[in-house]
Image: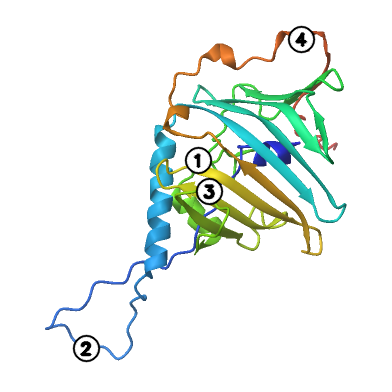
Amino acid sequence: MLQLILMAGIVVFAGVAIPPASAPASSPTSRPTTHSTSQPAPSESDVQIRSILERMEAMGDRVGDLRCRVEYTVEDLIGLSEFTKFGQILYKRTQPNATFFITFDKMHEGGIVSRKKEWYLFEDRWLSEAKEVSKTVIRREVIGKGETVDLFSLERAPFPIPFGQRKDEILRHFRVTLAGAEEGDPKNTDHLVCIPRPGSRLADTYSRLEFFVSRVLDLPVKIVAFEADPDGEPAKIITALFPDLTSKSINSGVSAEAFRLPAETKKYQVVEEPLEEPVRPVPGHR
């Protein structure tokens, strides 16, 4: 289920491998050398990608709360099936940890429309998953009591959100190219194609991530992930589309009361899964 949360707006941001800027040129009186140690100047594309990443980082710092719709589609290339869930994402920068709430209120699958609701709420240290169809609430403790988690960290966050990542982390974890615009792409966006570096957190799961970053908002309005099977072959295509994400979606004053499971879930069966205690070594005997 964390995979669902990952792509339904709690998606890790990808980055780009950009060569360092070239070294300062030698002055006319400098002693000539036979071997230059300077790096080649970054290409125009590299400079543009760096600028996109810097703007995304800066925008992430300014997001105090966010509210927008989400369309979450999973295409199973092996099982030859597809479904789309429609819902809303709420995010609020709170202490000690940020809070988010995702509600799905409709699903399309195989020509059938279902309106059974699903809710995913992360608050303090608990991730709650509630489903109308099963009348259950599963509460999973994802961090220990009193601990904090950096939801913007690529390495430490259990489910990083799709903004606020630091450019330095991005450069370490991904390679990115800037793709040209194609028919059907969201308007006025930059299309980043992101390849996880070998050994990175997502490399074992995804072969490619694509981000369509709004040139107005400096946030993604569409994210596509290509999931691979153990042999590296394409297995699923996961798409998150944010159709109404505008400047009005950001810092609109979302109230704390909006981050509550609905009253109907109080009648559901609750299953609690505390964080597993680390195994302590047994003292040796003399």
- Closer to the camera: disc 1 or disc 3? 3
* Disc 3 target residue: 186
- Closer to the camera: disc 4 or disc 1? 4
- Closer to the camera: disc 1 or disc 2? 1
Mark 4 Cα-neighbour bin, 10 Å: few <14, some 14–19, many ≥20: few
Q: State whether residue 154 appears in this view.
A: no
Figure check: 54 above or below 33: above
Q: Where residue 152 appears, x then y in whole percent?
A: 52, 39
Identify the residue at horizontal 54%, vertical 35% (top origin): 150
Disc 2 and disc 3 in contact, CB within 8 angstroms: no
- Closer to the camera: disc 2 or disc 3? 3
Task: Say what secondary structure mark 4 lies in.
Answer: helix
Report, in whole angstroms, how far the alpha carbon at label 2 lies from the one at label 4. Answer: 78 Å
Front residue of 118/147: it is 118
* Disc 1 target residue: 163
Q: With 26 as the anchor, is 250 left or right in this view?
A: right
Q: With 278 as the anchor, is 59 left or right in this view?
A: left
Look at label 4 and name its amino acid: Glu
Identify the residue at horizontal 47%, vertical 40% (top origin): 164
Return the disc, 1 or 2, that comes first in the chain's sequence: 2
Identify the residue at horizontal 58%, vertical 53% (top origin): 184
Report, in whole angstroms, how far the alpha carbon at label 4 lies from the one at label 1. Answer: 32 Å
Q: How many marks?
A: 4
* Disc 4 target residue: 264
Disc 3 and disc 4 in contact, CB within 8 angstroms: no
Figure check: 174 above or below 166: below
Report, in whole angstroms, how far the alpha carbon at label 1 lies from the one at label 2. Answer: 46 Å
* Disc 2 target residue: 32
